[in-house]
Amino acid sequence: MNELIKTIEDELPRLGLNKRDFCKVIKEEPQTYNNWRQRGIPGNKLAKVAKYMGWNLKALSEGRIETGGSENTPASMVLSGDADENAIGQIVEILIETQAELMAEGVLSEPYDAKMLGKMAKQAYKNALKNHELNPKSIKEGIRFAALLNA
């Protein structure tokens, strides 16, 4: 088994997740995950996995895994309760994409921590439930507004 996957599987219970939930959150098929167990996680998926696990991507890229931190990772925070995992997955993807755009534009100097991303995802999910729709444009605008307020 790949060492990184072993670490993920060791961390999932701490986060209150099982492998199936983790696959839903990262929008990967269970078969893809099983392939990773043997071959490792492709480089183009590491950032997504690190973000959902609440790991430091820089440390991960240096071969270190910083684990055991807050249990409030985006993955664990948004899966608590009766949340629709597909909607939450979409929201977290929008959050991560918008965060990258804001950093590229110089609006954000560093990425949000996992706890903040989780809070943003929960709020966006509540808004989607209230409005009976998932509107990516309004989620992006809300994140931009919050970033500008804090700039």
Image (spheres, grey):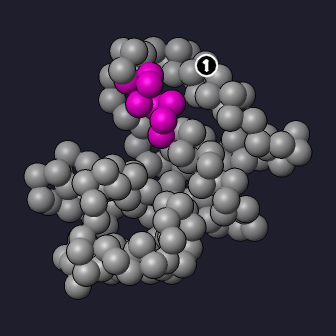
- Identify residue for label 1: 145
Helix, strand or loop under label 1: helix
Task: Locate residue 146 relative to residue 104 in the image: left or right.
Answer: right
Picture coordinates of residue 72, whole percent (x, y)? 48, 58
* Whole-percent x, y for residue 116 in the image: 50, 42
Q: Position of residue 123 (x, y in %)?
A: 69, 42
Q: Position of residue 46 (x, y in %)?
A: 30, 55
User: Could one spot residue 95 in this view of the protein?
Assistant: yes
Q: Residue at x 25, y 54 (%)?
A: 43
Q: Quadrant of residue 40?
A: bottom left
Q: Is residue 91 left or right of residue 11?
A: right
Task: Report the magenta residues as a range.
Answer: 96-103
Type of secondary structure dominating the magenta stretch: helix
Q: Amino acid at mark 1?
A: Phe
136 over 48 or under it: above or below: above
Q: Is residue 132 above or below residue 72?
A: above
Residue 117 versus residue 105 in the image, above or below: below
- In which quadrant will I find the N terminus? bottom left
Res 14 visible: no
Q: Residue at x 31, y 51 (%)?
A: 44
Residue at point 30% right, 79% down? 37
Is residue 98 one of those drawn in magenta? yes
29 and 22: which is toward the camera: 29
The residue depicted at 62 percent of the width and 28 percent of the height is: 140
* Position of residue 8 in the picture relative to residue 146 (left or right): left
Mark count: 1
Determine the image quadrant of residue 93: top right
**Mark 1 neighbour class, 10 Å CA radius: few under 14, some 14 to 19, many 20 or more:** few
